[in-house]
Amino acid sequence: MNLIFLGPPGAGKGTVASKLKDILGLPHISTGDLFRAAIKNETDLGKKVKLIIEKGELVPDQLTVELVKERLSKDDTAKGYILDGFPRTITQAEALETFTKIDSVINLEIEKEKVIKRLSGRRLCKECGEGYHIEYMPPKKTNTCDKCGGELYTRKDDNIESISNRLEIYTKETQPLINFYTEKNLIKNFDSSLAADKVVENVANFTKSL
Ligand code: ADP
Ligand code: ZN
């Protein structure tokens, strides 16, 4: 089963997809995570994309498509995958069609005001990447990961300027994908303002019908 997660930044794509990964036993492929790993490891790719990502702009389509194409060629995607954060432009969606077939597009809907609150309070574990929110999903111990005890940090693009940039780019570049996939009868909408566990449950139930 090949799934795409669509939605504005802060809709909870990463949170929901990483929980669904365990339920469905499919790899969770987040282009944002792949880029951040490249930045952390100071690879050539990481050096190219660091400033772009910090500002909240989009990495060029060609670089992104190559990265995804290579990732989807790995053996662990044989039974399917969950794509999170890709495609983000019509060009990327068209490229994706040339090398794989999508079964469903999970569209996470949320108002923009909520997104800003979610992103500005988001914290992530330096060690294992687990996500938290200072208000909505706080760790048991301040600034410390429940799972591994790692220290939490704030993403460089979770500042107000980059957040508004990301939202503007979402509206202009990514939102048109909703029509693109609606025309192909692939879209399924979910209310993503609900608690994460509820969204996970709703999406998991839906995937049983696929
Ligand atoms: P969010 O959905 O919260 O904005 P992601 O982790 O998905 O965060 O992405 C972080 C950043 O990585 C984006 O703002 C962008 O700079 C880059 N990026 C991720 N996926 C893509 C993509 N498909 N195309 C271009 N840039 C991307
Ligand atoms: Zn951790």
Image: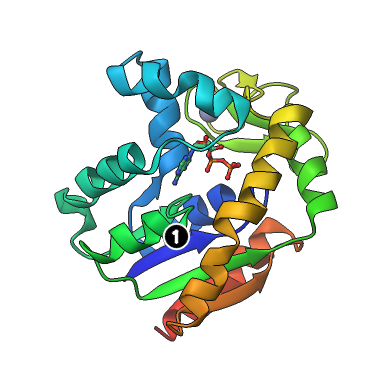
What x and y, as percent, mark residue 170?
A: 62, 51
Q: Which residue is mark 1?
A: 90
Give the camera-side residue of 10 and 207.
10
What x and y, as percent, mark residue 125?
A: 57, 26
What x and y, as percent, mark residue 5?
A: 50, 60
Q: On screen, 162 above or below 107?
A: above
Give the camera-side residue of 108 and 52.
52
**Image quarter for residue 159?**
top right
Residue sitting at the far top = 42
**Image quarter for residue 192?**
bottom right
Residue at 14% across, 51% down:
75
Residue at 31% across, 46% down:
65
Q: How has the structure been colored for display?
A: rainbow
Which image quarter holds the C terminus?
bottom left
Disc 1 is placed on an element classified as: helix
Residue at 82% across, 42% down:
117
Specify whether residue 136 is in view. no
Relative placement, left or right, of 152 versus 58 is right
Which image quarter holds the N terminus?
bottom left
Q: Could you tell me the amino acid type at mark 1?
A: Ile
Give the camera-side residue of 59 and 74.
59
